[in-house]
Image: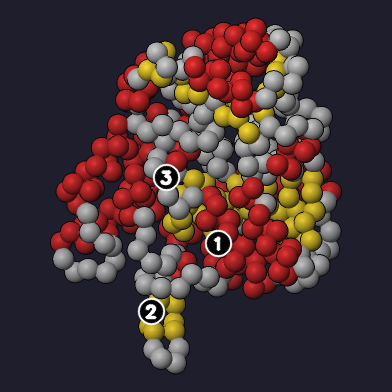
Amino acid sequence: MIDVSAVRSDFPILDREVNGHPLVYLDNGASAQKPLPVISAINHAYHNEYANVHRGLHYLSNAMTDKYEQVRETIRTFIGASHGEEIIYTTGSTEGINLVAYSWAMPRMIAGDEIILSVMEHHANVVPWHFLRERKGVVLKWVEPDENGNLHPARVLEAISSKTALIAITQTSNVTGSVVDVDEIGREARTRGIPVLVDASQSAVHGKIDVARMNVDFLVFTGHKLYGPTASGALYVRRERLAEFQPFQGGGDMIEEVTRDYVTYAKPPRKLEAGTPPIVQMIGLGAAIDYVSDLGMDNISAYERKLTEYASKRLQKLDWLHVHGRPEKRAAIFSFNLEGGAHPHDISTILDQQGIAVRAGHHCAQPMMEFLGVTATCRASFAVYNTIEEIDALIDGLHVCRKLFA
């Protein structure tokens, strides 16, 4: 199990105060804080090791290349991929999904082809497909969760038609925390020959990822939600799909030969990784994955499940608070509104005065806001370093908000 006191000691920012109160950081769904091993790995790389990768013959370049490429193996193991070439380095989930949209879907899809999405998707898994709708005439087919926020695989599978070209689905809603059974979707879609993309931005930090078990063709996750640095992340592409990708960014490092008359491309993954990459950021991501792997993803899941159950019980007792969604399986994410119409921005501001950091807005999920019938919510999202006492502080803070806005 998790020793939360020991974990908290790894995150120096948690010792600070905000507005005269101990920091209670509950905005992890937007971005998680960074542990000392990640901070140290980044500092060490800049202080002692930095050089560009792949292109130099000198000691520092070779050493940095080896360290940078080792992260690919770390990611491969972390998500259960079979081959290192299936791991494409990205700056995060947004770039990963755009890479699939431009390099794989754009050359292959034609007018009338259908992409199945859920209304729970983050804009990163919506806007690139709108680009294809605008430019190629692709049709977006939307699937809704039930009244409790559960997105049943059957609803996704029922949307399949003879024109379905892709299913692009989140594994965990960044609004309600609802966890989707992507294994069942992937298994059935594979039997029908339909590619599946999974957005694991919110799920990779909360539990084990296994792309083989999921039967997916593409999966993205982002480093900064996984206790790693910004501008780090990865796209998994099933080996059999790699040959179907055309590079959409051209430049250094993704070529074999360039002449006046033609260009030949490097083999994947470098074919899809143009230019000088986010070298130190990826080293930081490797350190973050090592950190959570040492804690144990099963241990993290078990501890966060306790936090989720406790938070759910306490929040549901506030009959003047509307918590959106009661999914059968949820991650440690809760969105809510105060009865009476207080704006989430005002609630967030009052909580901030008490040192409590939550998110307020549409969370880059406007189709989901429309489904819920609101324009914005407050969101509290928990991490492995959060505590029962911090949930109690959130509840106390919400009582203060009620008194102010009643």
Q: Which residue is mark 3?
A: 230
Q: Residue at x 50, y 20 (%)?
A: 352
- Count of labels in the image: 3
Q: CA distance from mark 3 to mark 2?
A: 30 Å
Q: Which of 90/156 is in front?
A: 90
- Does label 3 or label 2 sit earlier along the sequence? 3
Q: Quadrant of the N terminus?
A: top left
Res. 332 in view? no
Residue at the farthest bottom position: 261
Q: Residue at x 26, y 62 (%)?
A: 52
Q: Residue at x 36, y 55 (%)?
A: 278
> Picture coordinates of residue 9 (x, y %)?
32, 21
Dot 1 lies on which element?
Answer: helix
Dot 3 lies on which element?
Answer: loop
Q: CA distance from mark 2 to mark 1?
A: 20 Å
149 over 278 or under it: above or below: above
Q: Residue 99 has which mark?
A: 1
Dot 2 lies on which element?
Answer: strand
Image color mode: secondary structure
Left or right, 363 with respect to 19, comes to right
Q: Residues within 10 Å of mark 1 (few under 14, many from 20)?
A: many
Q: Which of 174/361 is in front?
A: 361
Label 2 amino acid? Glu
Q: Which residue is mark 2?
A: 256
Q: CA distance from mark 3 to mark 1?
A: 18 Å
Label 1 amino acid? Leu
> Picture coordinates of residue 284 (x, y %)?
34, 44
- Does label 2 or label 1 sit earlier along the sequence? 1
